[in-house]
Amino acid sequence: MSKIALITGATSGIGEACAHTFAQQGYQLILLARREDRLTKIAHHLADKYEIEIKQVLADVRDKKSLSAALETLPADWKKVDVLVNNAGLSQGLDPIDQGNTDDWDTMIDTNVKGLLYITKIVSNWMIPNQSGHIINIGSIAGKEVYPNGNVYCATKHAVDALSKAMRIDLLPYGIKVTEINPGMVETEFSVVRFKGDEDRAKKVYENLEPLIADDIADAIWYVVSRPKHVNINDMLIMPTVQATATIINRKNG
């Protein structure tokens, strides 16, 4: 059987771009997402275009029981995962800490931290008997810096940064690589989700600048995964040319 990549949050943005990239490279895919219609559409398209096998897993990484049940139904051969891309993540709101919505906090913590942990525990235990594997955690510039009103989102991505370092230590005896990919501004559904469907507000985030696109990050992930067995890229920070830090950006019209 060809190599297998499991991608979470596979129906949009970086996750969808990774699905296309790994399919193009001949990987069989396990695509995990919450939106069934989009998941089915993407899976059928990639299977037809690249003549690969794809397993669809309809699950929410926040729901530990249903996530585990959905993954454990996979056939034994499909549990020989070579690459796990922990992409599922989001931001909700952009408020100062004293005005934050605690439901938003729970959603970010449950998705970005606990969801990543749930799926990593399951898949790392599939990798350990094979003494190999590669876990890619999607972090953020928000995991390297803190910016105004980013409080809890930044905290969750700082947690991803710490967990990536810890996983690398814990999984070292089993030959499992761990890489953290930290993007700056990437134009995906990220801002639309952050602003709860307010597309006009989301568009303003990317006005008068050229941000990264999802394919840029998928390309970097493929570079990391395609290194020789003895090489691991621990940490990669990827910014658009117009962005120096989380908050210092060169917009064309000031």
Image (cartoon, rainbow, N blue to C red):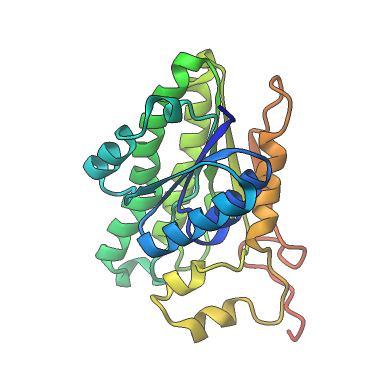
- Residue 90 in sight in this render: no
15 on left or right of 22: left
- Examine the image and state in which quarter residue 64 appears: top left
Foreground pick, 94 / 209:
209
Instruction: From this view, report whether residue 20 is shown above or below residue 101.
Output: above
What residue is drawn where x is 66% and y is 63%?
A: 213
Residue 93 x/y as whole percent = 39, 71
Can the viewer see residue 83? yes
Q: Quadrant of the C terminus?
A: bottom right
Could you tell me residue 19's position as x and y percent?
57, 50
Quarter of the image containing the N terminus? Answer: top right
Residue nearer the viewer, 130 or 160:
130
Name the residue located 59 percent from the left edge and 30 percent from the top edge. 2
- Identified at 26% across, 47% down, the residue is 63
- Name, please, the residue furthest toward the left: 65
The count of marks equals 0
Query: Along the horizontal axis of the image, is 236 left or right of 126?
Result: right
Compared with residue 117, is residue 124 higher up or lower down, i.e. above or below? above
* Residue located at (39% from left, 25% from top): 76
**Which one is nearer the viewer's eye here, 184 or 41?**
41
31 shown above or below 122 = below
Residue 58 position, x and y percent, is: 34, 51
How far across and down, in percent of the image, does residue 107 sit? 31, 58
Q: Nearer the viewer, residue 19 or 162?
A: 19
